[in-house]
């Protein structure tokens, strides 16, 4: 029997990519599509974008959408995601969270909910990015001291948070591998006479514009050489496919907080 998937934010760019991926998967079924109250697409059939009518319409009735689904996938905004998270707790449904920009209080709510339902929470669902985190951990352990680390990222003009959640996660991995907390060593902007660079710092540079899906580069800069680990996304399909893999993963998992390393079986490498 097909696994029922509910998509939050179905009228958005990522929501449409997720719906397309679900409809194309033989083992999955699109059983719910959510949007905010007042959204102009409420009541429409997502088949308008998918090329064939679907058995659901876009709704703001969260309990009804979850009733027919086993897993909710959410790539929306923190406030909306936390509403959906609470509904999943009530309904006993797993949730895949690709939303970024949570504050510490929001992250605490996600951790608390994971005691009751299975959750995959990752700032980037790409399998390539997940593997790059493993490579960054290795590089950061080997290339110290004497190598300065800078992280650059670029996204489309509509992205609302900066640096990206992926860039921050990359910084967290590098900082932890070097025995630091990112909050203690991150530098998010440089202007004017900043003085010499402190060797422990991790710098971030952000670009926003056009339709860039997502580019991330971590540079390890030493004397006479530079190692760069780069991931470039050319479409949202890779995020969607990763999210579907995460949904399959938690469908039969006990309550807990998982990430993409768990989904891909890479957790033992960290």
Image (tube, helix red, strand yellow):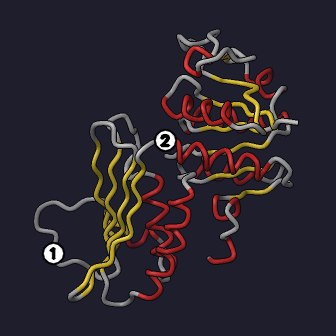
Q: How many marks?
A: 2
Which quadrant of the rendered structure holds the N terminus?
A: top right
Left or right of 12? Residue 44 is right
Q: Quadrant of residue 155?
A: top left
Rendered residue at 30%/53% (across/down): 206
Q: Position of residue 208 (x, y in %)?
A: 29, 43
Q: Which residue is mark 1?
A: 195
Mark 2 or 1, which is nearer the eye? 2
Q: Position of residue 176 (x, y in %)?
A: 51, 76
Q: Which one is in front, 260 or 193?
A: 260
Using a 10 Å C-alpha cutoff, classify the residue at mark 2 as few (fewer than 14 neighbours), some (14 to 19) or many (20 or more): some
Q: Is residue 102 above or below residue 196?
A: above
Q: Quadrant of residue 263?
A: bottom right
Residue farthest toward the left in the current orientation of the protein: 193
Q: Is residue 261 above or below residue 48?
A: below
Rendered residue at 61%/21% (across/down): 35
Using a 10 Å C-alpha cutoff, classify the residue at mark 1 as few (fewer than 14 neighbours), some (14 to 19) or many (20 or more): few
Q: Position of residue 254 (x, y in %)?
A: 86, 55
Q: Position of residue 94 (x, y in %)?
A: 78, 43
Q: Which residue is mark 2?
A: 236
Is residue 83 visible to the viewer in this orientation of the structure? no
Q: Which one is in front, 253 or 145?
A: 253
Q: CA distance from mark 2 to mark 1?
A: 40 Å
Left or right of 118? Residue 179 is left
Q: Badges 2 and 1: C-beta atoms under 8 Å apart? A: no
Q: Which one is in front, 70 or 205?
A: 70
Is residue 234 visible to the viewer in this orientation of the structure? yes
Mark with earlier residue (2, 1): 1
- Which type of secondary structure does the marked residue at label 2 adopt? loop
Q: Is residue 102 above or below residue 166?
A: above
């Amino acid at each position: 029997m097909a696994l029922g998937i509910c998509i939050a934010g179905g009228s958005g760019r990522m929501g449409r990519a997720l719906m397309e991926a679900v409809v194309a998967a033989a083992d999955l079924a699109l059983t719910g599509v959510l949007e905010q109250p007042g959204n102009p697409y409420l009541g429409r059939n997502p088949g308008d974008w998918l090329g064939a009518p679907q058995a659901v319409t876009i709704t703001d009735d969260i309990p009804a959408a979850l009733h027919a689904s086993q897993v909710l996938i959410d790539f929306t905004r923190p406030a909306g995601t936390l509403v959906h998270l609470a509904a999943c707790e009530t309904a006993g449904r797993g949730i895949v969270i690709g939303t970024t920009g949570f504050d510490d209080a929001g992250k605490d709510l996600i951790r608390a909910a994971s005691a009751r339902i299975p959750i995959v929470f990752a700032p980037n669902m790409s399998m390539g990015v997940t593997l790059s985190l493993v490579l960054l951990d290795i590089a950061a352990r080997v290339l110290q001291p004497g190598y300065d680390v800078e992280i650059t990222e670029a996204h489309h003009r509509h992205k609302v948070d900066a640096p990206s959640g992926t860039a921050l996660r990359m910084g967290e991995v590098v900082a932890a591998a070097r025995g630091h907390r990112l909050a203690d060593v991150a530098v998010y902007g440089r202007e004017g006479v900043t003085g010499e660079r402190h060797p422990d710092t991790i710098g971030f540079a952000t670009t926003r514009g056009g339709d860039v899906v997502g580019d991330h580069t971590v540079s390890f800069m030493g004397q006479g050489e530079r190692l760069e680990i780069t991931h470039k996304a050319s479409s949202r399909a890779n995020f969607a496919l990763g999210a579907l893999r995460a949904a399959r993963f938690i469908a039969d998992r006990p309550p807990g907080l998982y990430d993409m390393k768990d989904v891909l079986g890479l957790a033992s490498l960290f």
